[in-house]
Amino acid sequence: MKLTATHVPHLATKISIDLNRSGLVTMTSGLEKVAGEAEKVLLESVKKETALEARVYEMIDDNEEQIDFYLADERQLFFMIKKKLAEEFGVILSYEERFSDLAHKILDELYEEDLIHYDVSENRIKNVIYDAMTDYVADTSEIESAVIDTINTYKRKVIPGTDEYEILFEKLYKEELTKRGMA
């Protein structure tokens, strides 16, 4: 699953909660500061991928006539170009490798900002962060389905894509995260 800016605050909160629950770290400034630093690192990654995708779309738009002429599959072309430019934009496309890299960067930031102390190996802490990310991704589709099901039970139909729908979705999403102990 691709991380989006919408997911970042929830994921950052989950990381801070999981670190706190792990019993492996002592937080020097509380959950919010830890979540804030994790959020900065995650947002940077999302911004890089967004910039990469914007460049890919730009290249496809610039060559639209040739793409149409050769009847090229735009979706396949998009991923081929994205793969080719990923290194230039500093984006790791393999989610396993990306999450491992992000876990390391988050740990580095938390340590440099003196937000956590620990007496175990860095790898154990990094694994807690990595597991928080992979667990979040695994739970996200289930949570989104639960939220959509809840919205569909409303007597008054809320139309997807409207501001009202987005606000309601975000509110119910946060409630579902809280129910599951992720917020």
Image (cartoon, rainbow, N blue to C red):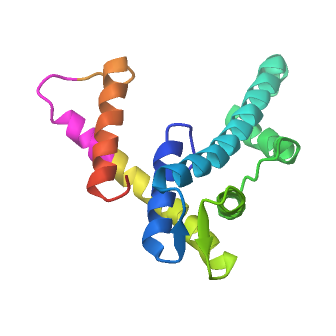
Q: Is residue 119 left or right of residue 13?
A: right
Q: Is residue 152 inside the magenta stretch?
A: yes
- Residue at figure coordinates x 46%, y 67% from the top left: 20
- Residue at figure coordinates x 76%, y 37% from the top left: 77
Task: Give the image location of residue 1, x and y in percent.
Answer: 55, 51
Task: Give the image location of residue 54, x and y in percent.
Answer: 73, 28
The answer to whether 165 is drawn above or below residue 113 in the figure is: above
- Residue at figure coordinates x 54%, y 72% from the top left: 25
The answer to whether 55 is drawn above or below residue 88 in the figure is: above
For this orientation, the residue located farthest to the right is: 88
Q: Is residue 55 left or right of residue 142?
A: right
Q: Nearer the viewer, residue 153 or 45?
A: 45
Which image quadrant is residue 164 in? top left
Q: Is residue 24 left or right of residue 177?
A: right
The answer to whether residue 58 shows anywhere in this view is yes
Which image quadrant is residue 70 in? top right
For this orientation, the residue located farthest to the left is: 155
Task: Give the image location of residue 116, x and y in percent.
Answer: 59, 65
State the predominant SS element of the stretch in magenta: helix
Q: What's the magenta region?
A: 145-157
- Residue at figure coordinates x 74%, y 26% from the top left: 57
Task: Give the image location of residue 48, x and y in percent.
Answer: 74, 39
Which image quadrant is residue 112 in? bottom right
The answer to whether residue 72 shows anywhere in this view is no
